[in-house]
Amino acid sequence: MSGQAVRRRYIRAAPDDNEYVQIDHKLEGDFTFSYAALVVEESPLGGCSIVCLDSVGLEKGSVCRMKVGHMAPLRSEIVWVKVLDEHVVRLGVKFLE
């Protein structure tokens, strides 16, 4: 786009301090989290971005269940991945329900 930055059409919000998400790879049955991640941004469009170890096994297009803070578990899709270093990734999450 001729060198100009693309402007967001909505404002992202900072999460509460130390807000975390629990991740369950199973889509059915009782929610049992296998991994935890830190929420770094929340989107008013129904999603967030999280930071976690790359060993959680999520990649772009993965669908899992996530429980953010005290919310009920939600089916979620990973919409983007940014590698921060050899062990840490930042993931863009879209809630599907």
Image: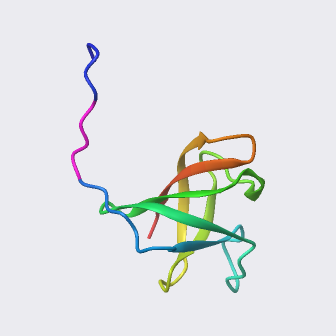
Q: Looking at the image, which residue sits at the far top?
A: 2
Residue 10's place in the image compared with 68, above or below, is: above
Image point 68% across, 40% down: which residue? 85
Residue 96's place in the image compared with 54, above or below, is: below
What segment carries the magenta color?
6-10
Image point 54% across, 69% down: which residue? 75
Q: Residue 7 colored magenta?
A: yes
Q: How many marks?
A: 0
**Viewer-side residue, 20 vs 18:** 18
Residue 20, horizontal then vertical, whole percent? 55, 73
Q: Looking at the image, which residue sits at the far front?
A: 17
Q: Residue 55 colored magenta?
A: no
Residue 94, horizontal then vertical, whole percent? 46, 58
Image point 45% across, 73% down: which residue? 17
Judge from the rendering whether residue 46 lies leftward or rightward of residue 59; answer left or right.
left
Residue 23, horizontal then vertical, whole percent? 65, 70
Judge from the rendering whether residue 87 lies leftward or rightward of residue 9; answer left or right.
right
Q: What quarter of the picture does the N terminus occupy?
A: top left
Image point 49% across, 86% down: which residue? 70
Judge from the rendering whether residue 10 lies leftward or rightward of residue 96; answer left or right.
left
Magenta-colored segment: predominant secondary structure: loop
Residue 93, horizontal then vertical, whole percent? 50, 57
**Viewer-side residue, 61 vs 10:** 10
**Viewer-side residue, 14 vs 10:** 14
Judge from the rendering whether residue 81 lies leftward or rightward of residue 26; answer left or right.
left
